[in-house]
């Protein structure tokens, strides 16, 4: 019974630590974490629909996502140490990590849109034309 009580307390502490960690992050960094998760899920569903699931592609994508998060973490640490702040065009001041996370959020939004189009989700024609232009120019969004 005592072991169960210790286990429950440890579980509560772990949940509290995770919640405190996320609540301490800038909203843009939280949004990036959610966008990455959504991109992974939509990418896997689109690959499943295409019948093109490939573990090497998945591993490469997960590695890229991890590197994005490490880049945001590094930018946040450098920004705090050097006291670098970025003024947002609509007002307010962001830390360097939040500004970098904002850039990656735009990239994730494009990737999610591409995944939805690959899965056959109906999209306005102008979105599909723009996605095709991006793919033609870069080979990949």
Image (spheres, rainbow, N blue to C red):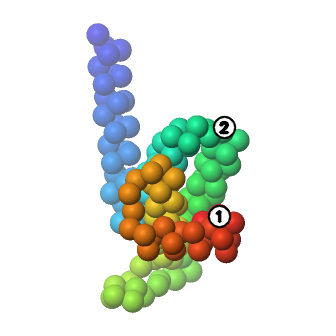
Disc 1 secondary structure class = loop
Dividing the picture into quarters, in which one does residue 64 lie?
Answer: bottom right
The spot of residue 90 in percent (x, y) is 34, 88
Count of numbered badges drawn on the protein: 2
Query: Residue at left 47%, top 49%?
Result: 119
Q: Which of the two marks, 1 or 2, is nearer to us in this view?
A: 1
Q: Nearer the viewer, residue 7 or 95?
A: 95
Q: Residues within 10 Å of mark 1 (few under 14, many from 20)?
A: few
In the image, residue 20 sits, relative to residue 27, either above or below, namely above
In the image, residue 97 sits, relative to residue 19, either above or below, namely below
Query: Residue at left 51%, top 74%?
Result: 130
Q: Residue furthest front?
A: 125
Disc 2 secondary structure class = helix
Query: Residue at left 33%, top 88%?
Result: 91
The spot of residue 13 in percent (x, y) is 34, 37
The spot of residue 116 in percent (x, y) is 45, 54
Question: Mark 2 — residue?
Answer: 55
Q: Is residue 44 visible?
A: no
Question: Mark 1 — residue?
Answer: 140
Q: Identify the image quadrant of the C terminus.
A: bottom right
Query: Residue at left 51%, top 53%?
Result: 118
Q: Residues within 10 Å of mark 2 (few under 14, many from 20)?
A: few
């Amino acid at each position: 019974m005592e072991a169960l009580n210790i286990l429950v307390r440890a579980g509560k502490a772990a949940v509290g630590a995770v919640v405190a960690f996320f609540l301490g992050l800038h909203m843009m960094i939280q949004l990036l974490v959610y966008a990455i998760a959504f991109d992974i899920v939509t990418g896997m569903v689109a690959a499943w629909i295409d019948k093109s699931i490939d573990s090497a592609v998945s591993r490469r994508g997960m590695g890229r996502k991890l590197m994005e998060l490490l880049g945001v973490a590094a930018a946040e640490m450098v920004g705090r140490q050097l006291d670098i702040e970025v003024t947002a065009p609509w007002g307010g001041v962001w830390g360097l990590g939040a500004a970098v996370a904002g850039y990656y959020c735009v990239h994730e939004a494009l990737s999610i849109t591409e995944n939805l189009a690959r899965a056959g989700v109906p999209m306005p024609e102008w979105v599909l034309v723009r996605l095709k232009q991006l793919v033609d120019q870069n080979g990949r969004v």
